[in-house]
Image (spheres, rainbow, N blue to C red):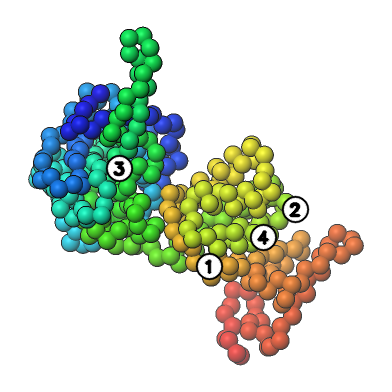
Amino acid sequence: MYILNRIHLLLYISGDSRGAFLSFFNDAEFDSISIKKMIVHVVGGKQDFAPQPALPVDEDPHIAFFLARIVDAAVSPVHKFDERSATRALLKEMATGGKTFEEGGQELARRFKLDHVGSSSGGAFFVFELGTYDPKTSFYSLIKYDYREAVELYAKDGKNAFRQIVQAFVKEKRAIQKSCLIRVKDGVVEGEVSAFDRMGEAPDLTDYFQKFLEVRRDRDTKELSDRLSMVLRDTLRDCKKHLPGKDAKLALNVTKESLSGRDTVDDEAIREAIFVAAGRPAEDIRAEIDKSLDRHLKSQKLTGVSFKPDPRTLKRAPRMKVRTAEDVLIEYPGDQENRAVTLTEDDKGGWVIVIKTSQALVEDDFAGKRARRGA
């Protein structure tokens, strides 16, 4: 076990983190990802910055712990680097050999400590370089880790005893205060940034962390909410057979209503709202819903992202589409159901569909031809 500047690493190895990994990494990257280099500095306090050497990763028996922490902090990217970001430029130098990893890691830590505001808690600033099966692709992970007080159980003279560890790193996700994960391909630092800041109003970062990274929001609240609507629609459509009355439209409205009033939504909030709309199904059905939800969250780049939803977007009813056995197709806004459009089941197993309009038809032509509005 390493002891660095009186920092003790209290290790709790986590389980399978594949879902979190896939918020930023693809399947092939996940299967081959590994930590190649790491360096850590103490930040906070009034002591002068003291550059530290890189740690010998190959000799660290606890490297899996840190790899799991990088996974825990990985989220789908919501930010992009500014064109003139000094942090991006420094990472490029590290990736292309302009600076050694140790030199670059020390410089990043020095800058972070310089920008570290007085009200921030002390902790450790980690820089990791990660490799994959592809020698042309690498990743850099920057993590500000809080200290935690812990009590360790150990054997002394054949008996159990306790000792206090004042500065410990634990596996709780909330112990990670700030995180940044970026991809480098062929020496080019990609613009998308997976960034997380526990102290910010998610998904926004605190001012000084945003200043340090020199990034900006790339997706606003409306876009995130629109993507969330698509995730809900597609997940409930996949799992329609498990919904009460097999009514995906009703379940979608219930789920949206539940989420629209929340201060923030994230994977767990979305999952719980869907389970409620599905009538709190059994464990095997939950697993099936989970699988579909994870797939669509990844598709819409929402895995791990927390944000305040746009209530207008979530309350807006989706467009409905009805196709009859006679191949008659009707599409209409969901909020017009039982208003402009009425569907009634008859006593023979068929349906009567009534469409009412208070004005002249906007379009009345052969399919495939565009009619002039107001003609």
Disc 2, SS: helix
Compared with residue 126, is residue 298 higher up or lower down, i.e. above or below? Answer: below
Residue placed under numbered mark 2 in the picture: 245
**85 left or right of 78 in image:** left
Disc 4, SS: helix
Amino acid type indicated by mark 1: Pro
CB atoms of marks 1 and 4 within 8 Å: no
Q: Estimate how packed mark 2 is, as few (under 14), some (14 to 19) or many (20 or more) residues with alpha carbons within 10 Å.
A: few
CB atoms of marks 2 and 4 within 8 Å: no
Residue at image position (27%, 45%) is 144
Choose the circle earlier in sequence order: 1 or 2.
2
Amino acid type indicated by mark 4: Lys
Q: Which mark is residue 146?
A: 3
Closest to the observer: 237 or 307? 307
Q: Estimate how packed mark 3 is, as few (under 14), some (14 to 19) or many (20 or more) residues with alpha carbons within 10 Å.
A: many
Residue placed under numbered mark 4 in the picture: 249
Choose the circle earlier in sequence order: 3 or 1.
3
